[in-house]
């Protein structure tokens, strides 16, 4: 009996003090039918121990799922970086694929491209990232299809779609925590996650 009581106290202490490191945060999750009609609203209660950034929302809510690994890289200004999936294989889009990041004059990743892999059923897509005056991403658009024509190493941009296949609108609080993400599919609201 003494062992059971000791085990219970130990587990309770670990649970209690483990929760003290983070804070309980409620998120209101609204799902829509694709035509703007609200289907359901749920409250997700999470213990938050990290910054409310895009990685947090991808980990817990799976949106936005695709975005560049880093948004700002001072090493690149007005530069396009192409990384082949298998650098030892031939640089052929039919048998190998690429991850491409385009940086603007402010070293911000403004375009992220996955060339696709028909063999593994991964369709190509292009992600456009828009920033606010504090260099925080405020809109991420994803369109299926390459969006760029690659001729040798020169890339020619095709015009972006008027309405994106997928789009996330991101809102911040004064401490730069993300407090709301609205996901649109084909220009219509699909999901809204708001920190309560």
Image (spheres, grey):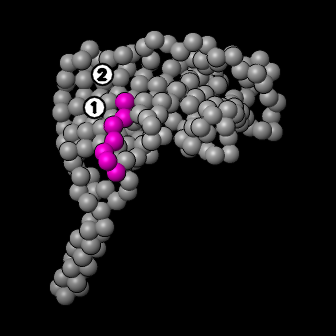
Q: What stretch is highlighted in magenta?
A: 169-175
Image quarter in which the N terminus is found: bottom left
The residue lying at 26 percent from left, 79 percent from top is 10
13 to 101, vertically: above or below = below
The answer to whether residue 94 is visible is: no
Q: Of residues 183 and 9, which is closer to you in this image?
A: 183
Task: Please state the horizontal and vertical placement of residue 156, each as a whole percent of the image.
Answer: 69, 16
**Measured Cα–Cα span from mark 1 to mark 2:** 8 Å
Quadrant in which residue 50 is drawn: bottom left
- For disc 2, the neighbor class at 10 Å (few under 14, some 14 to 19, many from 20) is many
Residue 129 placement (x, y as % from top left): 50, 30
Quarter of the picture containing the C terminus is: top left
Where does label 2 land, which residue? 189
Picture residue at 18% right of the left edge, 82% below the top: 5
Whether pointer 1 and pointer 2 mark residues with C-beta atoms closer than 8 Å, the reply is yes
Count of numbered circles on the image? 2
Residue 80 seen in render: yes
């Amino acid at each position: 009996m003494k062992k059971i009581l000791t085990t219970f106290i130990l587990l309770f202490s670990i649970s209690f003090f483990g929760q003290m490191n983070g804070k309980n945060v409620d998120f209101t999750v609204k799902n829509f039918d694709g035509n703007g009609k609200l289907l359901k609203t749920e409250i997700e209660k999470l213990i938050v121990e990290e910054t409310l950034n895009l990685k947090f929302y991808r980990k817990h809510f799976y949106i936005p799922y695709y975005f560049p690994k880093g948004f700002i890289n001072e090493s690149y200004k007005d530069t396009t970086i192409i990384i082949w999936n298998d650098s030892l294989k031939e640089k052929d889009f039919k048998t190998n694929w690429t991850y491409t990041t385009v940086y603007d004059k402010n070293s911000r990743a403004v375009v992220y491209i996955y060339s696709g892999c028909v063999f593994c059923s991964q369709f190509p897509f292009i992600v456009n990232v828009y920033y606010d005056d504090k260099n925080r991403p405020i809109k991420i658009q994803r369109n299926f299809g390459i969006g760029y024509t690659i001729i040798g190493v020169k890339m020619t941009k095709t015009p972006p779609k008027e309405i994106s296949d997928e789009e996330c609108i991101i809102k911040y609080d004064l401490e730069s925590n993300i407090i709301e993400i609205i996901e649109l599919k084909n220009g219509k609201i699909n999901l809204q996650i708001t920190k309560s």
